Image (spheres, helix red, strand yellow):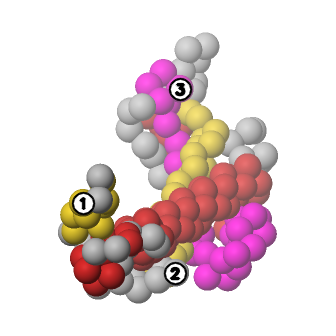
């Protein structure tokens, strides 16, 4: 056995025909994939996960507030008497959004338009609409109810540069049945 084989461990040398050549030491790369995965998840994965949760919360709250406005409008559209009952409309809307409860702000308003031009001028009183829309076979006034629900949604995670809360406002408009 040569002196080279005694000095250099067997994994750093190659021997052929009684001649041994020393190799450059190899680096052990076992476990590096786990370290790289952990770094990527910490630097990219966690912010993406938190951002997805934040957007999901805002979207869910937006849908819940829109449903509350729609529920209030559904309650009020059944008759002219219920269309002006703001406290009952507010209760119906708040019952539809139990996550917000009394923190949900609900406003309702009634307006009138001429049936010949529903996208036209809006009148605040029935007499003004009746005067502007002479009743005949093609034209009469139509009563509408607009319910607006709004609430402030707080962020799950506070992050510099992002708002800590957002204000969500949703409306629903329906024709009042006479």
Please state which of residues 66 and 176 is positioned toward the viewer in this rendering. Answer: 66
Q: Are marks 3 and 1 in contact (CB under 8 Å)?
A: no
Q: Earlier in the sequence, mark 2 or mark 3?
A: 3
The image quarter in which residue 144 lies = top right
Does residue 38 appear anywhere in the picture? yes
Identity of the residue drawn at 41% across and 86% down: 158
Q: Which mark is residue 115?
A: 3
The N terminus - image quarter: bottom left
Instruction: Provide the residue designation for mark 1.
Output: 19
Q: Which mark is residue 156?
A: 2
Q: CA distance from mark 2 to mark 3?
A: 47 Å
Does residue 46 appear anywhere in the picture? no
| Spot occupied by residue 15 in the image (x, y as percentages of width and height) | 31, 59
Q: Secondary structure at mark 3?
A: helix
| Spot occupied by residue 125 in the image (x, y as percentages of width and height) | 52, 51
Is residue 115 highlighted in magenta? yes
Q: Which residues are magenta?
A: 89-118
Relative to 152, 76 lies left or right: right
Relative to 144, 169 lies left or right: left
């Amino acid at each position: 056995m040569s002196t080279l084989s005694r000095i250099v461990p067997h994994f750093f040398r190659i021997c052929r025909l009684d001649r041994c050549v020393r190799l450059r030491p190899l680096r052990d790369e076992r476990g590096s994939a786990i370290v790289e995965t952990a770094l990527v998840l910490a630097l990219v994965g966690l912010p993406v996960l938190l951002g997805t949760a934040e957007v999901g919360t805002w979207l869910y709250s937006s849908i819940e507030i829109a449903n509350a406005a729609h529920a209030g409008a559904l309650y009020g559209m059944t008759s002219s008497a219920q269309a002006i009952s703001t406290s009952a409309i507010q209760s119906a809307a708040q019952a539809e959004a139990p996550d917000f409860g009394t923190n949900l702000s609900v406003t309702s308003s009634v307006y009138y338009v001429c049936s010949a031009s529903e996208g036209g001028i809006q009148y605040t009183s029935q007499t003004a609409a009746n005067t502007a829309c002479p009743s005949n076979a093609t034209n009469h006034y139509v009563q509408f109810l607009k319910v607006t629900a709004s609430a402030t949604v707080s962020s799950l995670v506070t992050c510099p540069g992002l708002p800590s809360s957002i204000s969500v406002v949703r409306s629903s408009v329906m024709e009042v049945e006479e």
